Amino acid sequence: MNTLIFRTIAPLIVAVMVVFSIFITLRGHNEPGGGFIGGLIAAAALAILSIATSVQQARRSLHIHPLVFAGFGVFMAGVSGMVSMAAHAPFLTGLWLELELGEAHVALSTPLFFDLGVYLAVFGALGAVILGLETDGEID
């Protein structure tokens, strides 16, 4: 399925899927979505890219090994739980920090960082599996 049409349209499909995965991740605590489904969509985008181009090209486009994403995501999710313990609250209790940047009002929260950690962990783990399965026996 490596046709000229697929190779031409794949970068656009991948870009739309990555933007959609970030949107789904960021709205996860207010509406359906979250880090897990966002990570699945991003991993599917990586699979499409590797099928359209090659596994080597997909690895080069990441710039970082997928397992580094997974490790950092697990670390980020764990730290988001530890922050609440440092504030003398139970593990994984949601804490919010309200920032006012000019006229903009930004709310940072530990659930947001937890979702981003899950996103990176799912994307990294599945990305490593996807790229590993498509290598045809080549060692990374």
Image (tube, rainbow, N blue to C red):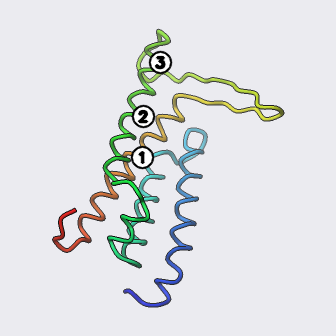
Q: Secondary structure at mark 3?
A: helix
Tag nearer the camera, 1 or 3: 1
Spatial CA span between label 1 and label 3:
21 Å
42 vs 127, left or right, is: right
Q: Position of residue 29 (x, y in %)?
A: 56, 38
Query: How many numbered discs sit on the rendered protein?
Result: 3
In this rendering, would 26 be left or right of 45? right
Q: Position of residue 23 (x, y in %)?
A: 59, 52
> Does the CB distance between marks 1 and 3 fall below 8 Å?
no
Q: Check the image and report above or below for 131 versus 53.
A: above
Q: What amino acid is labelled 2 in the image?
A: Met
Which of the 4 quarters of the picture holds residue 2?
bottom left
Marks 2 and 3 sit apart, C-alpha to C-alpha, by 13 Å
Q: Earlier in the sequence, mark 2 or mark 1?
A: 2
Q: Secondary structure at mark 1?
A: helix
Q: Nearer the viewer, mark 2 or mark 3?
A: 2
Report the quarter where the C terminus lies.
Answer: bottom left
Q: In the rendered image, which residue does mark 1 sit on?
A: 120
Q: Which of 71 and 121 lies nearest the eye of the viewer?
A: 71
The residue wearing badge 2 is 76
Q: Which residue is mark 3?
A: 84
Question: Nearer the N terminus, badge 2 or badge 3?
Answer: 2
What is the three-letter code of the residue carrying label 1? Leu
Is the residue marked by circle 3 packed among few (<14), some (14-19), or many (20+) residues within 10 Å?
A: some
